[in-house]
Image (cartoon, rainbow, N blue to C red):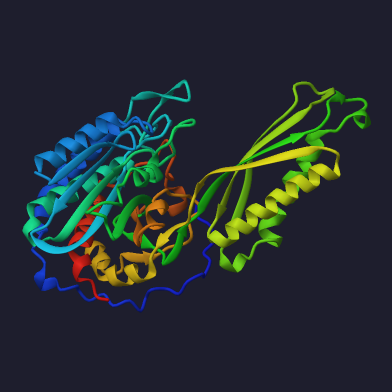
Amino acid sequence: MRPTQWLLVPALAVFCTAPIHAADRPDLEAALHAIEPKVIDWRRDLHANPELSNREFRTADKVAAHLRSLEFDEVITGVAHTGVVGTLKGGKPGPVIALRADMDALPVLEQTGLPFASKARGEYLGKDVPVMHACGHDTHVAMLMGAAEVLAQNREHLAGTVKFIFQPAEEGPPGDEEGGASMMIKEGVLAGPDAPEAIIGLHVWPDDSGSLVYRSGSFMAASDSLDITVTGRQTHGSSPWLGVDPIYVAGQILSALQGIPGRHVDITRGPAVITIGSIQGGIRGNIIPEEVKMAGTIRTFDMGERDRLHERLRATVTGIAEANGASASVTLGGGTPVTGNDPQLLREMMPTLVRAAGEGRVVEGNLITGAEDFSYYQQEIPGLFLMLGVGDPDVPRAQRPSNHSPLFDADEDALIVGVRTLVGFALDYPARAR
């Protein structure tokens, strides 16, 4: 998951970390101390009761009931199937900003042995599957619920309006369903009289517990699914010259694809990865089949180079197929844009991040080849996306279970850092140093 670091942008060590009008901020330590055990309890309940993408019914009900109990100005449910959007208006005039958490879990059988480990099951693409919060979205929801309570208790100090976006289906809607951030945007979460002008999201990650990891500019990769169908002409395996062998053609395509990132993409703009994870064709060793299907994923860090890669990939696949008397179709889909951090917004909010995590605990990270649909919000408004470390620092980094592992867990002591970050963004954004 963690590639070699690429020096695409300058480090942010020159950022000023002086407080943003600290004297104007309320003392929230008592409120944060009081909310911490609640956040942990919410996380454990959500962890024990995970729900798959577009099926987050119990989670949404829990979130909506909590926001209503805090007397939010507006609570809307059923956004993009199961999403919840709460609006909290502050006691002072100011801008509208958004805080986002994703809610869905994964079809993974939990192996953590936690006392609140999931035993839940669900239906995924027609199959009965185990369900686990293997990517930490339970912590995301719990932290945003905690931030909602702290800000609601201090709304007289809040300048402007905060929209709380609890999003379903970040992991991708099942089958041909629509969902996730793109659907929430389509249904107006960033529009209307309370349209936010900036947004922040957090994601737990197995870096040292309590750290905040950032990267200016591109941070997480754009992701595209790749499907290739090679069509030949079926014949007996003893007489390949009487047909067109799609397996032989697929082998050439597989090798050629690996040359595209290294020879046809400007790597000074960011690395690229093409992976073929599935090849299917044929049923007997002595029959050359009619067709071979290949499926994979593409990861890029520059949207312009992403387009160039797509163009070159199509030309390479069809060209190799035609040279062998076969034909090939290429389908690119499920695209998620690059996720990153708006450089100016990151610079302005760095003091808030340092206050939330502590000196020396806000660190520049490497590029991450994983993808996040938070990028759709960032296509519309400036945004920050930060990784919150939840890993045990006494365990070597390479030995900590990664996101999507059946062993993934979070150090709950780190969650208050996430709450502090979300609350700080809401309070400090109106008075940020430009």
Left or right of 342 on screen, residue 40? left
Res. 366 visible in picture: yes
- In the image, is residue 58 above or below residue 361? above
Which of the 4 quarters of the picture holds residue 308? bottom right
- In the image, is residue 163 above or below residue 14? above
Where does the C terminus fall, quadrant-wise?
bottom left
Left or right of 166 on screen, residue 242? right
**Where in the figure is residue 91, as x and y percent of width and height?**
8, 59
- In the image, is residue 215 above or below residue 137? below
Q: What residue do we see at 8% from left, 56% from top?
A: 154
In front here: 265 or 197?
Answer: 197
**Where in the figure is residue 45, as x and y percent of width and height?**
23, 33
**Where in the figure is residue 309, as x and y percent of width and height?**
64, 56
Q: What residue do we see at 43% from left, 49% from top?
A: 372
Res. 116 visible in picture: no
Q: Count of labels shown?
A: 0
Q: What residue do we see at 38% from left, 73% from top?
A: 12
Which of the 4 quarters of the picture holds residue 405? top left
Left or right of 84 on screen, residue 38? left
Q: What residue do we see at 41% from left, 52% from top?
A: 376
In front here: 120 or 168?
Answer: 168
- In the image, is residue 293 above or below residue 256? above
**Where in the figure is residue 69, as x and y percent of width and height?**
10, 39
In front here: 256 or 116?
Answer: 256
